[in-house]
Image: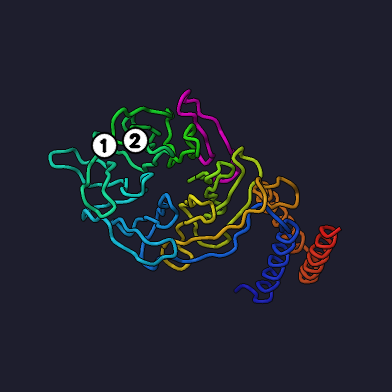
Amino acid sequence: MINSTYIKRNLIIRSAVILLVTLVSLPLAGAVTVTDHYQLTEGINQVAPAWSPDSDRIVYSSEQTIWTMNSDGTNKNEIYDSIVWDGEPVFNTDGDRLYFASEHVNPYSAKFISIHVVDIDGLNRTQITKNADMRAPAVSPDGTQLAYLSKLSGNYEIWVMDIDGSNQTQITDSDIDEGVPAWSPDGKHIIYSLEGNIWKVNIGPKVPSILKENYYTSYNPVFNPEGTKVAYVLETNGVKDIWIMNADGKGTKQLTFSDQDEIDPAWSPDGKSIAYSSNKAGEFNIWKMELSMTEATIPHDPEYKDEDDLVENNFIIEKLEDLARSSPLGVFIGAFILGSALVIMITKSFMKGL
């Protein structure tokens, strides 16, 4: 039987160590601050939010149907239901049509996941791709093209086509599935994930380059409206959170902190909010975080907690825990760490004010 005193001592030690590491890396000021979080939906499997061009409405996937709502979560409306799976919806640049992926196919067509378009009232559906699984549509900033994922070449690659489905052009070519594409605000680049890293490709030369190489797995990158920052999902120790970084891949900051998953970040066109999916309330639902921007870029300095700190902090936690447990005075070591953490926090605050 495990001794209860041993368990309590180890919990105290780990809590103290984590507090120390957290306070050491706690930013006192930053370029981006989350001012509030709101849960917008209450259901099951509410995912993949995307904004209308005016930032007033959000479209999302609810189970296997397409819904819209106001940006504050009111006025929810089911837009389209084909009985089979429909998902990954996005607005066009005029806000009067929706592009989405669906398992529904036209009569006498082969059964693939294909990209469709429908009016905002749910009428006049048109299937615009066929012959292979194609999904995850993303409308270009000028509204003339769609970036999307296609298996036409064997595995999921990024392709671009005209808004009506014509002129399909392959942009990437690898042996591994690419992640969901997103456009840069100038329409010249597409950002995506591959093998846990974040990549960027110019749709002209079609030469991909790594924008952010991560120790952990990252995916679902999306630019802010100014093109100066990128929001993305970072998975650490089996938990997914939303982070942001500068557009050059430097200077990162964590925006969500939960023992559950935050995924599908979607930056509002006005730059003030990020909608996302999370199961922190039990089931996956749509949430929104309000942002305060205080600087043009995210500082990359020792005071600003970024991804590099995660690797370093995990190492520190392991070593301090080993040190504490190797001594019969583990509880006292934990108390010492707690005191040290408070001293460091007070000192940092004082130095910041000089």
Of all residues, the one furthest to the bottom in this rendering is 4
> Which class describes the residues within 10 Å of circle 1: few (<14), some (14-19), or many (20+)?
many
- Give the residue at x 47% y 56%: 276
Mark 2 or mark 1: which is in front?
Answer: 1
Q: Residue at x 55, y 41 (%)?
A: 227
Q: Is residue 80 above or below residue 175?
A: below
> Residues in magenta?
195-217
187 left or right of 59 in image:
right
Rendering coords of residue 238 (x, y %): 52, 54
Residue receiving disc 1 = 129
Left or right of 176 in this view: 30: right
Q: Nearer the viewer, residue 161 or 175?
A: 161
Q: How is the image coloured?
A: rainbow
Q: Position of residue 143 (x, y in %)?
A: 38, 38
User: Total of numbered circles in the picture?
Assistant: 2
Q: Which mark is residue 255?
A: none
Q: Position of residue 201 (x, y in %)?
A: 49, 31
Q: Which residue is mark 2?
A: 150
102 and 147: which is toward the camera:
147
**Residue situated in front as seen by the camera: 15 or 156:** 156
Residue 297 screen position, x and y as percent: 66, 45
Q: Residue at x 43, y 37 (%)?
A: 178
Give left or right: position of 340 versus 235. Answer: right
How far apart marks 2 and 1 lie (CA) works out to 10 Å
For the residues labelled 2 and 1, say whether their Cβ atoms are less than 8 Å apart.
yes
Residue type marked 1: Thr
Q: Secondary structure at mark 1?
A: loop
